[in-house]
Image (cartoon, rainbow, N blue to C red):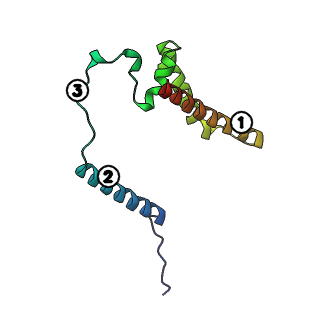
Amino acid sequence: MEQLSRVKATPDLVRKEALAAMIALALLSLVSALADAPVQGPADPSGIATEDVKAPWIFLGVQQMLRFFPPLLAGVALPLVGFFLIMFVPYIPARSSFQRSLLRVLVFGVLLVTIVVTLWGYLS
């Protein structure tokens, strides 16, 4: 009788990635248990000028856009347009090299605008 070879159901890469994720989680848990977070005292709103208050870095681009555009446009419409542009890129057919180039320009353009607006908000 011929011996059947078995096909592994879980590829080696997935197993290695799961192991790496568990090791990273264990190290992060160890570091967070041993080192205290550098948390300061409660915020005093009376001592800070409103111009100096900044959002967390991930929202700096939106905060910067709110200085120049109405809230509905800067806080909702423009981020959603960028999100949907990036989200639908895999579904846009790129049959020619010109179309592939346009898709690359679209993706990197949205990424560049996001980075520039975030850095602009951070540095201003």
For residue 59, which numbered disc appears in the image?
A: none
- In front here: 1 or 32? 32
> Which mark is in front, 3 or 1?
3
Among the two numbered marks 3 and 1 on one chain, the one whose residue lies closer to the N terminus: 3
> Which mark is in front, 2 or 3?
3
- In front here: 118 or 90? 118
Name the kind of residue labelled 1 in the image: Leu
Residue ID for mark 2 = 28
Residue 31 in picture, x, y percent from top left = 29, 52
Among the two numbered marks 1 and 2 on one chain, the one whose residue lies closer to the N terminus: 2
Q: Give the residue drawn at x 50%, y 27%.
A: 123
Residue 61 in view of the camera:
no
Residue 27 in view of the camera:
yes
Name the kind of residue labelled 2 in the image: Leu
- What is the spatial separation of the Cα atoms under label 2 and label 3, in whole angstroms? 26 Å
Residue ID for mark 3 = 42
Q: Give the residue drawn at x 27%, y 55%.
A: 30
Name the kind of residue labelled 3 in the image: Pro
> Which mark is in front, 1 or 2?
2
For residue 102, which numbered disc appears in the image?
A: 1
